[in-house]
Image (tube, rainbow, N blue to C red):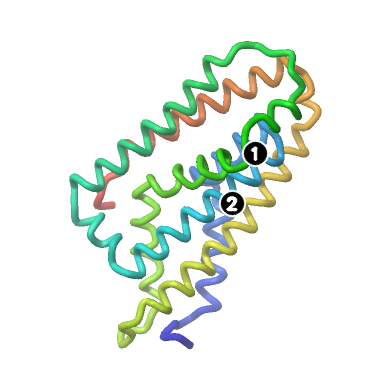
Amino acid sequence: MFGIINFEVFVITAILLNLTPGPDTMYIISRSISQGTKAGVYSALGITSGSIVHTLLAAFGLSIILMNSTLLFNTIKIVGAVYLAYLGIRMLIVKKTTVPEQALVQKMPHRKMFLQGLITNVTNPKVALFFIALIPQFISLENTSPLPFIVLGLTFCLTGGIWGLFVANFSSLSTNKLRGNSRIQLVLNKLTGIVFIAMSIKLLQTKATQ
């Protein structure tokens, strides 16, 4: 079908890989714990959209260019790392507030939450490496169309998106009472900041050849 082979195996593989904790999952958990369900959900949707971008880039060969250009690879990697570090530092230096958690979440536009997740994923060249390494294994060698790559990529994005939404809701609900305490909320924000900075350092260690 569409030049795809072992589709069932791919779906199982995609689900298992999405269930494995990684930078995207940690990002969603951190956002959900520190800022609530909406922040986690919109971050998850942003990350899923970023994966769709990677799917299209890989399908039409643009990711190959990225992998073969050390300058471009490092530029995107540094931009992503700096952005994550910026978000982390902002959360570390935030001052104690007595404003209720729900009010804080509502002040951050949904579009901003979405864009942060999108940028975090798109500026991670390791995701491009992953798509190029995994998906071709499930496409017939005789195929010359980008369609099977797109179908498989979107399938992976769908399973990842569902998992991300589950993680966002579960993380938020399980820590809802904690966020009601302003002191604990401050600690959660700082812990989230530390996670973002750690993610930026990990991203900087990514190499074009794995």
Q: Nearer the viewer, residue 19 or 166?
A: 166
In the displayed structure, does residue 50 sit left or right of residue 137? right
| Residue assigned mark 2 | 45
Q: Residue at x 47, y 53 (%)?
A: 50
For disc 2, the neighbor class at 10 Å (few under 14, some 14 to 19, many from 20) is: many
Q: N-terminal of the two: label 1 or label 2?
A: 1
Q: Is residue 142 above or below residue 181?
A: below
The residue positioned 69% from the left and 41% from the top of the image is 38
Q: In the image shown, does 86 or 200 lie closer to the viewer?
A: 86
Query: Tag on residue 91?
Result: none
Q: Which residue is mark 1?
A: 39
Q: Locate residue 109, reporting x and y percent.
A: 62, 37
| Residue 72 x/y as whole percent | 22, 47
The residue positioned 55% from the left and 78% from the top of the image is 8
Q: Position of residue 192 (x, y in %)?
A: 57, 28
Badge 1 element = helix
